[in-house]
Image (cartoon, rainbow, N blue to C red):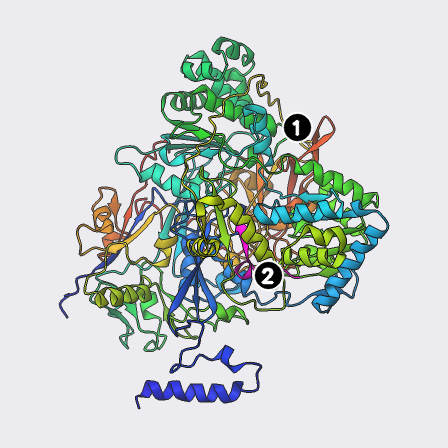
Amino acid sequence: MKRRTFLQLGTMTAAASWLSGCRSANEKLIPYLTPPDEGVTPGMAVYYASSCRFCPAGCGILVRVSEGRAKKIEGNPAHPLNRGKLCARGQAVVQELYHPDRVTQPLKRSGPRGSGQFTRISWEEGLALLTEQLGKLQRERATDRLALVTPPLRGTLAELAAGFMRSFGSPRHLSYELLGPDWLRTAARRSFGQPSLPYYDIAETRYLLSFGADFVEYHLSPVQYGFAFGRMRQGRDTVRGHFTYVGGRMSLTAASADRWMAARPGSEGMLALGIARLILAESLFDAGSLTANGLRADDLLRRLEAYDLDRVAHLSGLRQDVIAEVAREFATTRPALAMAGEPVAFQTNGPDAVRAVQLLNVLVGNLNRPGGIYPDAGETTGPEDSFAELLSLVDRMLGDRISVVMVHGDPVHAVPPATGFQEALARVPFIASFSSLLDDTALQADLVLPDHAALESWGDVIPLAGTREPVIGLMQPVVTPLYDTRQFPEVLMATARGLGGTMAAAFPYQSYLEMLKSSIKKRVGPAGGGDFEVVWVDLLRQGGLFKANNGQGKSLRWAAGATLPDPGEPRFAGDEKQFPLHLQVYPSTAFLDGRGAPLPWLQQLPDPMTTVVWDSWVELNPETAVWLGISFGDLVEVTSPQGSLRLPAVIYPGIRPDTVAIPLGQGHHGGGRYAKGRGANPLALVALMGINREPQPAWNATMVRVTRISEKGELVTAGNPQGSYRSELIEI
Amino acid sequence: MEKMTSPYRWGMVVDLDRCTGCGACVVACQAENNVGICGKREIAEGRDMHWLRIERFWVGEYPNVRVRFLPVLCQHCHDAPCEPVCPVYASYHNPEGLNGQVYNRCVGTRYCGNNCPYAVRVFNFYSHEWPKPLDNQLSPDITVRPRGVMEKCTFCIQRIRRAREDAEGEGRKIRDGEVQPACAQTCPTEALVFGNLADPRSRAARLSRSPRGFRLLEHLGTHPSITYLKGGGREHV
């Protein structure tokens, strides 16, 4: 007997005798001599195709599974969106599955809300509790006192949730996400007459002009646009695409730009119109495009008269010659592409500023052509003003007109307190959460019915944007569920069955899987051929339904009667004397709006721009820091009219001296051991701003002041503040 | 010294014009290689365990400021300063040009890490924990290194081995692009290209001859296997 065989057998015998008391020794131990039934070969990994639902981008993934354990997530090379690539967040999702603090079974609150005291209950008991609450509403004929709060859902789950609420008789389904692209849909409706999200052909463009669109980090479809960016730079033999970024803070995306224009916050839309005016005045526009879009150059020029170079330079704080140079470059390089992003949209003049950027594309003829923008890509369904719905729900909750709230996701963390959401939610008598971790929302809940982890779930994932082809990604469970959890849609269906009557009749399916299959069957249509089971297995193996683009989107044009964008000057919350600095909140590269914070790989991932780990921070221009007497790593207090926070300071050369920035994502009260009590949530500082007394999601329109508290910021960076080598030494 | 007879000489090209610094490679590497999870204190002590890091440089001053990113991993030097100093031959050079580390030989003198100009060797100063059931994610292909052992990037040698076994089984050589380390596989912008530099037609070999190419700290004469390609068109700073 060889030494290795001896050790194997020895270990097996020892382990077997030790494990024999456990519920199933076979689950723990894989015999070497007789392989188990499920096709498990020791040492051989199996790959399952699935889809990532971590962010709305919806990339295709392959999960490497070895001996029944998910090991690693990779991009699915067959998926037309991400082509085998995957971002840092997507790869960390395996830690959501194996998170040590997952909720392992239903919980009922036993202490005061927020205390985290729960008793474990069975699913029967948990479902009975929820059904009882909903049944009571039905009996009282007050079904509109039920609210469902979720992130924007797509595909079969959206159908199911809508069906549930419809058959129950409540119109209060709020699909809200802080970073949802509602603003882009609204702008598209006003400019192009249809609320569809655009597709930007970055790979083929020669001049990319981004007004705050951070497509490397989070904008629409970061992996797809990252891939396209690589090709724009070095994918063509003789052409290297040029990239200019406009925005008051140098984001990770801006760091890759050739030119960074640090425009004053809120001035981006006016800058876009200034550029438009210059292009018109110098006759650099595309006459054919203007005619095709029903616009007239002389008319436009007259109406944009107010945006002369002098005024725009003054408003944006940029040099006149720089603006003129960029305008000329943009107009004379074909194809060129202008895109607008969240920092521009989340200002009081955001809705029109975004449209000003769209007008730029029309002006130089970038619509519906390679290297330009396709305004009609993908589905037109999706919330356009979920923020107003959020406020109306808050109103109802404050007026005690909501008795039961079912929440999926963590809005308590990711909705700005200025909206009054947290306060209003506290008044609701019964809250049910479906979180798989005790996050901030689950901590407030009366009942927690834990959802499966993504890698244990069935589902379909329709990418938000980033492709012109119709794509439906499929999610399949790659491991047997670890705990006594149930998938959110299964719980909805079980509740409907429990309520009986028309509710039960609305869901004639045995399981969510059955519903999913029938919905996919409809999507495949007769083209799939005979046996759907065969098609289904094929789709699962491939990772989804990827059709070639035979239909071609509509070539949308500037809508007849669309008004000319008029951003006007931005307004800010906070008196300039008391609060001299602009606050910009931005999604952290690792955590997005906070959903990544529970995962230790993402906590440990140094922020690309600051190399900070396991923390949050406030970014200050070196000049501002000197003026305020703050040095790197000091603890500072940031105060806005809305509230104040203490966090460490980072001296950040890539930000305007009149602006400070704080990343979103940290500052959780719950969310497991890795997220809890770490850093601060800047949403606490954000004030609510409105146009004509109608509140807007203007999250970047708050002014703050910063004061130094002490030198003990306890900031940890993975790299030296300047980098470990002098850059001239390594010639980059 | 043994003559290099292998048909493979593994190397990488890092295109800094494509690299956006997004950090996907860092997590990919950590996931593939059972790299320990380090807390705040450990990193504060400069004991981060990442095998691959992205250096960030600020160049210039506001408003004419630029950021440059530089992914730094083991350069797999052909004259590696880390190799001759190991008293127990834990650090060695294999015929395929990889700079290997034999974990169960390592006695933790840290001479190699001390001698590495790129600071890419990381030492297990602490025992790293994967609180249950987080340990389920550990890859069975790679050992979990205990406290007191030096570890480093291997170009995902487990993947190379598997590809070689597959290729040998079919009686052929490994094809270009057939094997990729986790970092290159996931890089959204395709900034990292891995391949056989002994094959002049491989993508990596072709790119490594680019006029934009340079080696990291080239003047030290370590002859790295990684070629960096300078970012182009930085005309505005």
On screen, residue A651 versus residue A704, left or right, reads: left
Q: Name which residue type carries label 2.
A: His
Q: Name which residue type carries label 1.
A: Arg
On screen, residue A457 versus residue B159, left or right, reads: right
Q: Give yes or no for contact between labels 2 and 1 (Cβ–Cβ under 8 Å).
A: no
Q: Which mark is residue A452?
A: 2
**Along the viewing direction, whichever of A341 and B100 lies nearer the viewer:** A341
| Callout 2 crowding tier (Cα within 10 Å): few <14, some 14–19, many ≥20 | many
Residue A456 counted in the magenta span:
yes
Q: Residue A515: percent from the left, percent from the top?
A: 59, 53
Q: CA distance from mark 2 to mark 1?
A: 44 Å
Q: Quarter of the image for the N terminus of chain A: give it.
A: bottom left
In this view, which residue lies farthest toward the front?
A530
Q: Residue B90: percent from the left, percent from the top?
A: 29, 74
- Give the image quarter of residue B234: top left
Residue at image x 37%, y 52%?
B71
Number of on-image labels: 2
Q: Secondary structure at mark 1?
A: loop
Q: Which mark is residue A186?
A: none
Compared with residue A420, is residue A449 higher up or lower down, i.e. above or below? below
Sequence-wise, the earlier of marks 2 and 1 is 2
Q: Residue A451: percent from the left, percent from the top?
A: 63, 60
Asked whether the viewer can see residue A641, the reply is no
Asked whether the viewer can see residue A693, the reply is yes
Q: Residue A284: percent from the left, percent from the top?
A: 40, 15
Asked if labels 2 and 1 share a chain, the reply is: yes
Give the magenta part as a residue range.
A450-461
Q: Which mark is residue A571?
A: 1
- Give the image quarter of residue B114: bottom left
**Along the viewing direction, whichever of B89 and A99 lies nearer the viewer:** A99
